[in-house]
Amino acid sequence: MKSHLDFIPQKYTQKLVEKGKFQWSAPSNIALVKYWGKKENQIPANPSISFTLNNCKTTTTLEFEPKGFTSENFSFDLFLDGIPKEDFKPKMQKFFERIAVYLPFLKDFHFTIFTQNTFPHSSGIASSASGMAAMAVNLMSIEKLFNPAMSDDYFWQKASFLARLGSGSACRSVKGSVVVWGENSSIVDSSDLFGVAFTEKIHKNFQCFQDTILLVDKGEKVVSSTVGHELMHNHPFAVQRFEQAHKNLAQMKQILIDGNLEQFVALVESEALTLHAMMMTSMPYFILMKPNTLEIINKIWKFRNETNIQVCFTLDAGANVHVLYPEEVKNEVLQFIKNELIDYCQNQQYICDEIGNGAQKII
Ligand code: PMV
């Protein structure tokens, strides 16, 4: 698929779709090379690559019923953990508006959306990636009822494409353990429109890779990702940053194939700090790290120096720290986390996760 127009269906072979329901889970993901800055319609300003997570996920049940009449409005109810969630509705409404041209049946149905996350809602872990990915695959299951001959490739590419329109990084939460989003000369078939699974064989050092998420601060972010991306327009270092991300992605590809953990650590930590450096050098500038974020980073550096265990950190747009390490050193690193890092977490909270496989159909 080369253009967004390829995702506008020409005609459906099935005219009538009765009421029904689907249920999918979709995971969160953690970027190694970060997406920060976008063009119109959620087109990324630079390519990114992420590990798909396994335990941090959203499960969404989507019930659908023909309205029986045509109207210009979307009709849906939304429940989080079984409770009506009115304040999530504007975001869903906007998502429906953005994707309506690609899913012409949307206005013909009433939808009831039941969603729940495995991670605490106010943990500072964004549910937008897993949540939008779970919605997108559910909606593709409905589209498949209208077009049963749909190919698997089309299903997954369009699911990622739709998820991207909900939240950029959500397109990396649909399919694959390692996902690239954004055109890059080193990745065949990479696209700005959707995420693609990394097809090279990943070195055994990265199989079952661990991500322990330290919940440093669960508060509302001072600056949202949307505003942060916006501030990359006219940013003094934007051009260099976008170029650097292209080079870093090519380098990361080789690292994942070769299994060089020292190079992995250096590149991942540099990417995390570059992301936050972009925030600190935006105008207006802002800081999302907290004092405990820095305490943890320093402890990780000290532990790595002393033990030569290749554990590293990465950060998203927030204060929480993702601690990344090979499965082989799981016991040592978990002990270190318990002994030295959990006191820097709010209520000593952390989540153990690892590399996963993407969205799963439940019903
Ligand atoms: O998908 P958004 O708009 O929430 O952007 C998220 C960007 C980062 O998490 C900071 C980096 C990334 O690539 O996931």
Image (cartoon, rainbow, N blue to C red):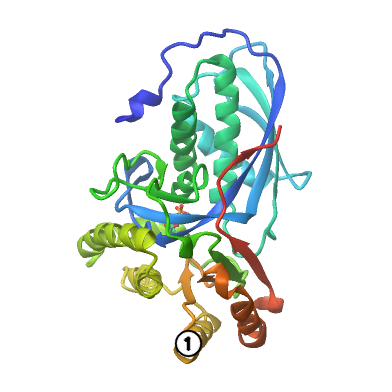
Between 113 and 140, the one lying in front of the other is 140
* Image location of residue 231, percent across then percent down: 33, 60
Query: Tag count in the figure?
Result: 1
For the point 53% across and 83% down, the residue is 296
Height in image: 323 above or below 149? Answer: below
For the point 48% across and 90% down, the residue is 302
Asked if ligand 1 lies within 8 A of label 1, the reply is: no
Q: Is residue 226 visible?
A: no
Q: Is residue 239 visible?
A: yes
Q: Residue furthest right?
A: 82
Q: Is residue 92 left or right of residue 47?
A: right
Q: Quadrant of residue 348?
A: bottom right
Q: Amino acid at mark 1?
A: Asn
Callout 1 secondary element? helix
Between 304 and 236, the one lying in front of the other is 304
Q: Which quadrant does the N terminus fall into?
A: top left
Q: Which quadrant does the C terminus fall into?
A: top right
For label 1, the residue is 298
The quarter of the picture showing ligand 1: bottom left
* Image location of residue 156, percent across then percent down: 48, 33
